[in-house]
Image: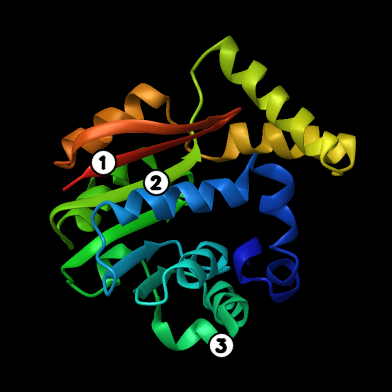
């Protein structure tokens, strides 16, 4: 059983991103502002990796006319998303599965936050292509996740990520252990590879908008 399928771990999920992701609330706000560029007031947004519901709540609370389709492979995380949305949940269709299981759309925009670093490199381009083909021409994809250089620099940035978590209240030894487990267990890609994958999937106008220790975020157009 993965952490995302463990009800007790899922119940504690909201504690993690706020301690680990620098400027999480502003990341959500920047993502929404970038989506504003292509999503009309009554638009429909695809959220990939929607479990937990933090970004869904941020988007729905700020844009009362938007509708959402969220996909996530974890039923428990989708239950948490519904609870997080509360009275806003009627504006979001939550589906168990991956992006290939999402409706065809076309959507006015898409977000994929703190998710793609779990996807193996061999599946990155296919995953991005599935998102792209569900978007309207010119629509924006906003994504952000762990992305660090190769070689000795990787360890330096993982140490900085750990230092941020420890400074934000995570027990120091746990912070360092978590950071280096991430470095070993996740299929982390370099920022250059991330941009290459987006372009190979057919996206254009790929621009960096967020950089915070081990995290990077880009906006790209269909």
In this rendering, the label closer to the viewer, 3 or 1: 3
Residue 131, given in percent of the width and then of the height, sits at: 24, 56
Give me the residue at 84% from left, 34% from top. 167
Q: Nearer the viewer, residue 9 or 49?
A: 49
In the rendered view, tell whether residue 28 sits above or below residue 72: above
Cα–Cα gap, marks 2 and 3: 26 Å
Cα–Cα gap, marks 3 and 1: 31 Å
* Residue holding disc 3: 87
In the rendered view, tell whether residue 19 sits above or below residue 2: above
Residues at discs 2 and 3 in contact (Cβ within 8 Å): no
In this rendering, the label closer to the viewer, 2 or 3: 3
Give me the residue at 47% from left, 51% from top. 115
Give me the residue at 43% from left, 50% from top. 31
* Residue holding disc 1: 220
Mark 3 or mark 1: which comes first in sequence?
A: 3
- Res. 111 image quadrant: bottom left
Dot 2 lies on which element?
strand
Residue lying farthest to the left in this orientation: 137
* Residue holding disc 2: 143
- Res. 155 image quadrant: top right
In the rendered view, tell whether residue 19 sits above or below residue 40: above
Colour pattern: rainbow
Mark 2 or mark 3: which comes first in sequence?
A: 3
Residues at discs 1 and 2 in contact (Cβ within 8 Å): yes
Dot 3 lies on which element?
helix
One can see residue 114 in this view? no
Label 2 neighbour load within 10 Å: few <14, some 14-19, many 20+: many
């Amino acid at each position: 059983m993965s952490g995302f399928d463990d009800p007790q771990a899922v119940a504690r999920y909201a504690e993690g991103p706020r301690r680990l992701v620098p400027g999480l609330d502003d990341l959500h706000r920047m993502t929404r502002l970038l989506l504003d560029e292509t999503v009309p007031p009554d638009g429909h947004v695809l959220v990939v990796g929607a479990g937990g519901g933090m970004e869904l709540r941020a988007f729905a609370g700020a844009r009362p006319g938007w509708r959402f389709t969220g996909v996530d492979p974890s039923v428990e995380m989708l239950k948490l998303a519904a609870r997080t949305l509360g009275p806003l949940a009627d504006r979001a269709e939550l589906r168990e599965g991956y992006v290939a299981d999402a409706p065809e759309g076309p959507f006015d925009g898409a977000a994929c936050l703190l998710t793609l670093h779990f996807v193996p490199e061999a599946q990155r381009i296919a995953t991005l292509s599935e998102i792209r083909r569900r978007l309207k021409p010119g629509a924006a994809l906003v994504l952000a996740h762990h992305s660090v250089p190769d070689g000795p620099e990787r360890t330096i940035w993982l140490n900085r990520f750990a230092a941020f978590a420890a400074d934000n209240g995570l027990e120091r030894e746990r912070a360092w252990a978590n950071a280096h487990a991430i470095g070993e267990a996740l299929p982390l890609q370099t920022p250059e590879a991330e941009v290459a994958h987006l372009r190979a999937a057919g996206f254009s106008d790929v621009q960096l908008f967020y950089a915070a220790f081990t995290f990077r975020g880009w906006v790209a157009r269909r």
